[in-house]
Amino acid sequence: MTAPPAIAVLGLGEAGAAIASDVAFAGNRVLGYDPAQHPPEGIEPAAGVPEAVAAAQIVLSVNSARAALEVAEAAAPALTPDKLYADLNTTAPALKRTIAAVVEPTGAAFVDVALMEPVPDWGVRTPALASGKGAEALQRALGAFGAPVTYVGSEPGAAAARKLARSVFMKGQAAAIGEALAAAERLGCEEWLYGDIEGTLTRADGRLLRRLVEGSRKHAGRRVDEMAAAVEMLEELEVEPRVSAAAEAWLRSLAASEVGR
């Protein structure tokens, strides 16, 4: 019976520690390194990045965007053609391609991984997108732990691009909700608005997205006036209309494009 591959986890913050612990609990040998964190129970501490990489077949970099390239450069001298290097950090597609350019000359297969849910809640089973030459191999390897990894192509950066496109919606939505609730607090109706937003987002009729996309194009001219009024109100309430002003500008652009057709 073939022994499961040893896995190195570089970065043992909240996300890295959760993934490493789940893999170790499943019976795999897991080596961990983080200059600021002690490995959780069941994880073999490595003296440094090269030592962790040298002892593993699969390397998972779970750090931050600012550290991702530095970690890859530290790992590169220990990478060999039989290894797989997966970057799980949330970075721009261009940085993923830069990291791939560091990894691939070693012969190791590179994987761009985009984690699509909060890792502390899901651990190694966090839904993920993967792209790059090693993406299908990682999909098979992590699938053994119940990880739902979706292959999205052979190009580094493809997974990151999909996640960031989604982030425009997710984080933009959060910003819009925060701005609306700040206004509602000043108006004394925060609880009502919270419930109204919650009901709107959880409505299961399937028409909300179409109404937002198609309705904005169709009624952009009227909605510009509505958002201009909202911006004016927010300014009176001393709530900075960051999202509302951007929405007004976007609707003006849509209205102008419709007129030009």
Image: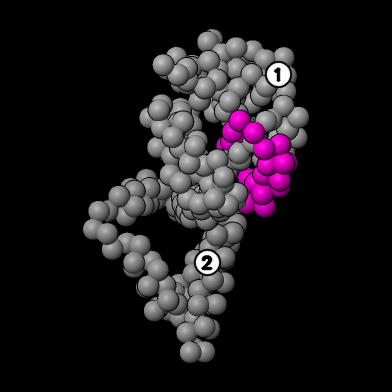
Q: Position of residue 111 (x, y in %)?
A: 57, 41
Mark 2 lies on a secondary structure that is helix
Query: Is label 1 in a helix, a strand or a loop?
Result: helix
Depth check, front residue: 85 or 195: 85
Asked if residue 8 lies left or right of residue 172, the reply is right
- What is the three-letter code of the residue carrying label 2? Ala
Q: Residue furthest top?
A: 41
Task: Please determine whether, in this image, residue 9 is positioned above or below residue 106.
Answer: above
Residue at (57%, 28%) from the top-left corner?
A: 58
Q: Position of residue 246 (x, y in %)?
A: 57, 65
Name the residue at the front extreme.
1
Tell me the tag on residue 247: 2
User: Which of the 4 image quarters holds residue 250?
Assistant: bottom right
Where residue 249 sits in the image (x, y, percent)?
Answer: 57, 72
Residue 261 has which mark? none
| Kind of residue sitting beneath label 1 | Glu
Which portion, as a residue range, is magenta?
A: 81-107
